[in-house]
Amino acid sequence: MFFILSKLLYFLLSPESWLVLVLLASFLAKGSQLRKRLRIAALLIGLAFSNPWLYRTANKWWQPDRTILPANAQYSAGILLGGLSMYDKSDTGYFGNNADRFIQTVNLYHSMQIKKIVISGGSGNLLLQEPAETDFLYKELLRNGIPKEDILVESKSRNTYENAVLSKRLLDSLQIPGPYIIVTSAQHMPRAIQVFRKAGYQQPLPYPCDYKVIDTRFNLNDLIIPDITYISDWKYLIKEMVGLVVYRLTGKA
């Protein structure tokens, strides 16, 4: 039930959805004054969430700083969270926009800073049956020179909470103690690291990557020229912010 409700909440948190719903309401409204107010509201939503400066500022505040590991540091395992790949209708896997998670995990292994790689992620698709994401990631790790004996697979989780709980169950069953590194997107890390701590991991080290916004020089165009692509991008950030609150309220973070 939590999984289904989270998908519904994700739809309701999207500024795209707000814009469509407000515009639809403006066409259905009977009073001219109400129609006018709704259309003004739609305009304000569009302007606010298409503003590059506002989006970049919110993201830079939310994303944690990079983690710089000491040169001689070594960790028992790096836990790679799913959500970085997809399948087509023929069940062929492809990397998505978050593939930097995979790249950084492979780099950590080849630099001998992690001994094992845990890949965690089943299928997050609510309606369609598709292979677990770990099926694809396992094959790609092998192709990138990771020995199969150093790859641990957790293929049942559908969300961050299940990533944490099921990965811990796997590591405990194999008697692989910490310390562990958690590898996920910088935007996702504030929620993920709190969930892992709540699940009983002792001082898991956050290793954020896949930064959506980096600290570049100020550009006046970002402040005054709208970019409608940001309306879609906002939903991922809002999902993480609200998701952290929901996870705390439900005892998962």
Image (cartoon, rainbow, N blue to C red):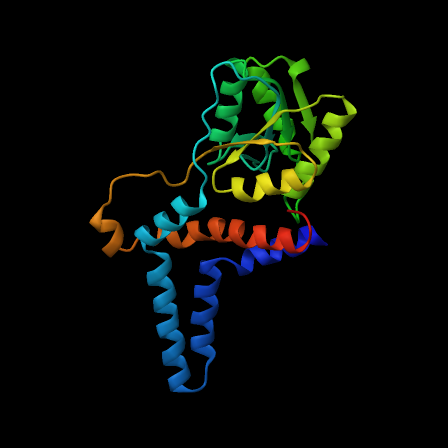
Relative side of 47 to 151, left or right: left
Quadrant of residue 192 within the rendered picture = top right
Q: Please name the residue shown 63% across and 42% down the image.
A: 195
Q: Which of the pair 229/109 is nearer the observer?
A: 109
Quadrant of residue 66 within the rendered picture = top left
Residue 68 locus on image (x, y percent): 45, 25
Q: Please name the residue shown 45% across and 46% down the image.
A: 62
Residue 125 locus on image (x, y percent): 63, 45
Relative side of 63 to 85, left or right: left
Relative side of 132 to 184, left or right: right
Q: Quadrant of the N terminus?
A: bottom right
Residue 212 locus on image (x, y percent): 41, 40
Q: Please name the residue shown 45% across and 70% down the image.
A: 22
Which residue is most to the right? 173
Against 205, is 110 above or below?
above
Q: Is residue 159 visible?
A: no
Residue 208 locus on image (x, y percent): 49, 33
Against 128, is 23 above or below?
below
The image shows a total of numbered marks equal to: 0
Which residue is most to the left? 220
Q: Is residue 5 visible?
A: yes
Q: Please name the residue shown 35% across and 73% down the image.
A: 40
